[in-house]
Image: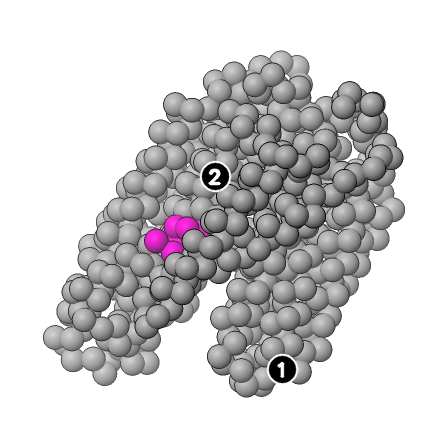
Amino acid sequence: MVWPLAQRPELGRRRTVAIVSGVLAATFLAALDVSIVGTAMPTIVGELRGFALYPWVVTAYLLTSTTTIPLYGRLADLYGRKRILLAAITLFLAGSALCGLAQSMLQLVLFRALQGLGAGGIIPVTLTVLGDLFPLEQRARLQGLTSAVWGAAAVAGPSVGAAVTDLAGWRWIFYLNVPVGLVALGLLGAALQERVGRREHPLDYRGALLLTAGMTLLLSGLSAAGEGRGAAPVVAVGAALGGAALLVLFWRTEQRAAMPIVPPELVRRRLMAVVGLGSILIGAGMFGLISFLPLAMQGLGAGTATTAGLTIMPFAVSWSVASTAAGRVILRFGFRSSVVVGMGAMLTGALVLQVVPRWPVLGWAVAAAALFGIGMGFSATAFLIAVQNAVAWSERGIATALVGLSRTIGGAVGVAVLGAVLNGVIQQRLGERAAIDALLDPAQRPSLSDALRASSERALAEALSVAFLLILLVVTAAVALVVVGFPREVLAGRVGARGPVAVSDGARPGDAREEVER
């Protein structure tokens, strides 16, 4: 049976600008939401009076947006990118509007979950659209643009959130998404055209249910495992193990499914397997850095929340700049050069990170964060484009989604493990965490006696030293995996008139002009 894939059209300038603008607007929606909501949370809790549900405002969004990533990737492969992307943006806007109308914390949590359902499709499908419509030369540069949007949102989000909350009220943080989303819907609806062959798609409902339930339990458990108080760790570990068991059952189901959500033959390919494992490892290192480096500067460096924000800002900025530069490196020298540069920068950043607990100076922290951002910009961009370029159109959506999902899972696992280690060392050295809580609060810090403050700082420094050493080991493992495991012909590419061409395990490159006989 011949399935005609979406043709890569000859895009005129106006259509190109419209599509890219629509993609960037959609990306901005998801990127800004990650950083802008946290600033308004104290005000929201004060008005809606639901402090017990405070963590779930973020957790509900992250769970739904993460667990749906592979589902959106597969649906985009089955039914086309346009309709799935427009549906995801519509869900996100509906959730945003309802969040602004919420009258209680429970309503806000539920509407944030709806918003996350839309966000789960925006990022993987927009990246897939760029992979479909633009040749490698343009795609490498466009990846830099999307990363720049993420960097700008990360830097501007907290300031914009504070200003909007003070001047117009917290509800406008969500209402502002609506005009931006409508612009994205209008541009993509009018300019994005694709032709997908009609066929019956036996949707793998059982696989979708098992995947969603397994990922929800796993991520919920891992997110709570590092809490370290009462029975919470036991419940969290039970949830994580239950989720892992469901994911094993999901994998066995996919082996027999006629149209699996995650094609087993795709995951078994050497390129996809190594990219997935590498993304898990660098995700653990990246999320570990952005979660615990601000803690070091606020607790050991006697900083404030502003200091903590300044510590992470170089990470976002350097990632966006490096992603733009990675496009040029890939085109000139191939995928392997970009990955090697990125991994080298990340390993150097992990080494610099070891100095911070012993010498908590802002300069060391900024250097470590900037080097990690450079590493992510060069390596993550090359990972994504290499995978997109090495699979057929019918697999590009799920392949793109799996790269992002792997990084998120690595982050959840990494932060949970590092949190458990941190709590364990502090408990062993100090006996209780009340003094650590006071040490991290600039208002309470002066109330600590000199002896208690010194012992608390020693315990926190020892705990962070162990955590940062684990980050170094994880990054080192990622470097070793990439050097040894990656197919050299994929990463090296062939540099010709149109740039590097990736070839992977016999899979034909994903040129949308082709037709694949199924």
Residue 356 position (above or below residue 339): below
Residue 186 in sight: yes
Q: In the image, 10: left or right of 405?
A: right
Q: In the image, 241: left or right of 503?
A: left
Q: Magenta part of the protein: which range?
A: 411-417
**Percent coordinates x, y for residue 234 in the rendering:** 36, 64
Q: Check residue 104 in the rendering and tell me which mark sits there, or answer none.
A: 1
Query: Which quarter of the picture shows residue 182?
Result: bottom right
Q: Check residue 279 in the rendering and tell me which mark sits there, or answer none.
A: 2
Mark 1 Cα-neighbour bin, 10 Å: few <14, some 14–19, many ≥20: some
Does the magenta portion include 335? no
Residue at point 47% right, 55% down? 242
Foreground pick, 168 / 91: 91
Query: Which quarter of the picture shows residue 516?
Result: top right
Residue 370 in sight: no
Residue 223 position (above or below residue 382): below
**Percent coordinates x, y for residue 202 in the rendering:** 76, 40
**Percent coordinates x, y for residue 168 in the rendering:** 66, 78
Foreground pick, 401 / 155: 401
Q: In the image, 473: left or right of 501?
A: left
Residue 93 position (above or below residue 402): below
Prevailing secondary structure of the magenta residues? helix
Quadrant of image for the N terminus: top right
